[in-house]
Amino acid sequence: MMTGTKFFPGLAVICGLAAAVFAATGVEADSTRPPNIIWIMADDLGYADLGCFGQQRIRTPHLDRMAAEGMKLTSFYAGATVCAPSRCVLMTGLHTGHAYIRGNREIRPMGQWPLPDSTVTVAELLQSAGYSTGLIGKWGLGGPDSVGIPNNQGFDYFFGYLCQRHAHNYYPEFLFRNSDRIFLEGNVVDNERLDGAGYAEGRVHYSHDIFASEALRFVEKNQDRPFFLYHALTIPHANNEGGRRGMEVPDLGEYADLDWPEPQKGHAAMISRMDRDIGRLLDLLRELEIDKQTLVIFTSDNGPHREGGNDPDFNDSNGLLKGIKRDLYEGGIRVPTIAWWPGTIEPGSASSHIAYFGDLMATAAELAGIRAPDGLDSVSFLPTLTGKGLQRSHPYLYWEFYSQAHRQAVRQGDWKAIRRRDGKVELYHLGNDPGEQNDISDSDPEKVRAMVRLMDEAHEPSEFWKMDIAGSEP
């Protein structure tokens, strides 16, 4: 993890460097204004929960149109298989082998394990390049009064949930605007939790709808300058405290009269509601005539959940992929991803380039015309988006997890290995077996050894995160 003084490239060279970047990549842009960047991230959305990624019964017309007008990234991965570490990877460009936050650890009574003050986030990088930076939605990387709050980590403006447990509740008693609690009159949670989590009895203000409006206001306010909007949605995460009532949504819409279990109606209605509001955001970019100056990326923080009564198999949330949230199989970490940038990205295109959340840092730096910090696990995928320039590849991608059976995973080209808590290593060839149905570890022990060496290379021991694997470190 990077420590000490925060690193920011020399700002005097930004404009000239940006011009060179755009010339090299073929991006048509005013060299004095780098493009806006919007990162929209769903919460627990499965790889096949969108029509454009194979969903048959949940309607997502606006995201399907986004894909038709942009590019599907079909081998794009989350930073982790659960919330907080995935978001840490996204913000820092460091994989979970040496990221500071590698699991959903909490500090009671309120909030997540915070990012250290010395952390350099992608928001700080873009802030140093003159971007207006905003986070609307769920943070999960530091609770109130900690060094990890968004305003200490590069965001000029924050509105939403600090604590991921708080974010379970779609009808919260309060949200945060920057460091201030904003109380939502009529939302009542009948418990004594300090973190705001629970199941509301008074249900007036639905947080997702507030976030959708806040995102529109942020874009309108910052339309005349470069901006970075991190729109971290909570849909379709369950309110875990609600049990089978956990798929909270104001109405079931077109799914209300279907002969489906109530949680599945709620899950589908949440996704369609999200789709509607992303359509509103893309429409606003067109209306403001800044669509050609704006890269929008849509994705999910990890695979689908089995919480709040939801059954990810009911609507085939993962398609051919194996596993869900908390697994290191493809279904837990490969996420549906769409990139949209009219006039720059070829409409209706698709790419199987292997990339992940940590690559946002290098990509954003290249777009802004500045250097990313050294020592990251981040490769710009801008050449893939533009079709210009040489696209570098990672030597491998790596993940760690600290509960369930899986502990480590690595992907190198078409090869994928998973090391379990009991020390057993599973080996798959994703080119032949994308659903990870055929473990070939017994037939290729040499490849297993090579993949284990990569895992050992990628893992940096941490006093906070102990890799509990049979035969490994204590």
Image (cartoon, rainbow, N blue to C red):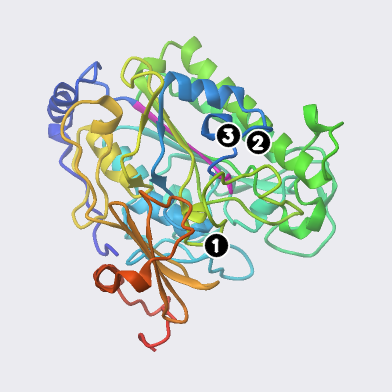
Residue placed under numbered mark 3 in the picture:
50
Q: Secondary structure at mark 3?
A: loop
**Callout 1, which amino acid?**
Arg
Q: Name which residue lies at 50% across and 10% down.
A: 287
Q: Nearer the viewer, mark 3 or mark 2?
A: 3
Percent x, y of residue 80: 45, 58
Q: Residue at x 41, y 80 (%)?
A: 423
**Rendered position, 441 above or below 252:** below
Q: Please, what secondary structure does the residue beneath circle 2 have? A: helix
Residue type beneath disc 3: Leu
Whole-number angstrom distance, CA of label 1 to CA of label 3: 21 Å
Q: Are marks 3 and 2 in contact (CB under 8 Å)?
A: yes
Residue annotated with mark 2: 271
Q: Which residues are magenta?
A: 36-46
For disc 2, the neighbor class at 10 Å (few under 14, some 14 to 19, many from 20) is: many
The percent position of residue 450, horizontal first and vertical second, equals 24, 69
Which amino acid does the dot numbered 2 rest on? Ile
Q: Is residue 101 above or below residue 63?
A: below
Name the side, left or right, on which 359 lies relative to 81.
left
* Dot 1 crowding, Cα within 10 Å, few <14, some 14–19, many 20+: many
Quadrant showing the N terminus:
bottom left
